[in-house]
Amino acid sequence: MKRLLAPALLAAVVLALPLAPVLAQESDRVVDGVITGVTAAPGGELVSFKLVDSAGLMVDLKVQGGAQPTEFGLENQAGDRWASDQAKAPVEAARRLQDHQARFAPVTVTVRGDTAVSVVERESGRLETNLGYLFALYTATWAAFFAYIFYLSRRQRDLQREVARLKDSMPRSKAQ
């Protein structure tokens, strides 16, 4: 049985290796950044855009219409949300991305290869989870501060007792 297991495992690995680049290429990645350029066709339809990601790298992204169009979920300066896709509103998509570029508004883009699958407002971290850590640190800081004050007051009381003991042990002068 052990003799058959090793060749079977080796064969499985050898057969899976050619699939690894295909699977890696098809996986989506998420890029957070700021739009630095928007390319539109003569009719105003969105063709592609560029953004600088959080690491400072320039990313050129195409958009697609058709059966699986690039989806958008963007807000304007007033906070009104617009959701559509490249097939339904390519001109409005170009205008919204140009607005985001002018405002330096961060976006989160899901990318497959060199094509944007979706473009949405930057997805921020969950503030609620960070508040727990902030409260814990705040509480620990104040606890340490009060412990230090308590320690100093004990030391001061000990020093006052020592001074009083030394004064009592000193010989009294005859002039008194």
Image (cartoon, helix red, strand yellow):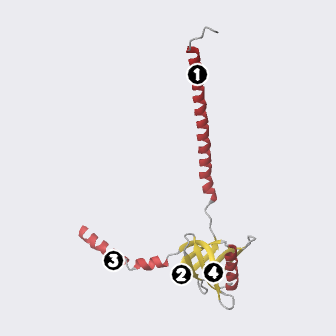
Quick one: label 1 or label 3, which is nearer the N terminus?
Answer: 3
C-alpha gap between disc 3 and disc 4: 43 Å
- x, y percent for residue 123: 62, 67
- Residue 1 seen in render: no
Q: Residue furthest left?
A: 3
Marker disc for residue 176: none
Amino acid type indicated by mark 3: Val
The secondary structure type at the circle numbered 4 is strand
Q: Badge 4, how many Cα within 10 Å: few under 14, some, many 20+?
A: some
Q: Which residue is mark 3?
A: 14
C-alpha gap between disc 3 and disc 2: 29 Å
Quick one: label 2 or label 1, which is nearer the N terminus?
Answer: 2
C-alpha gap between disc 1 and disc 3: 84 Å
Marker disc for residue 114: 2
- x, y percent for residue 69: 61, 83
Residue in view at x 37 percent, y 77 percent: 17
Is the residue under label 1 in contact with that under label 2 (CB below 8 Å)? no
Name the image quarter holding the N terminus: bottom left
Q: Which residue is mark 1?
A: 163
- x, y percent for residue 174: 61, 8
Q: Quadrant of residue 65?
A: bottom right
Is the residue under label 2 in contact with that under label 4 (CB below 8 Å)? no
Camera-side mark, 3 or 2: 2
Amino acid type indicated by mark 1: Val
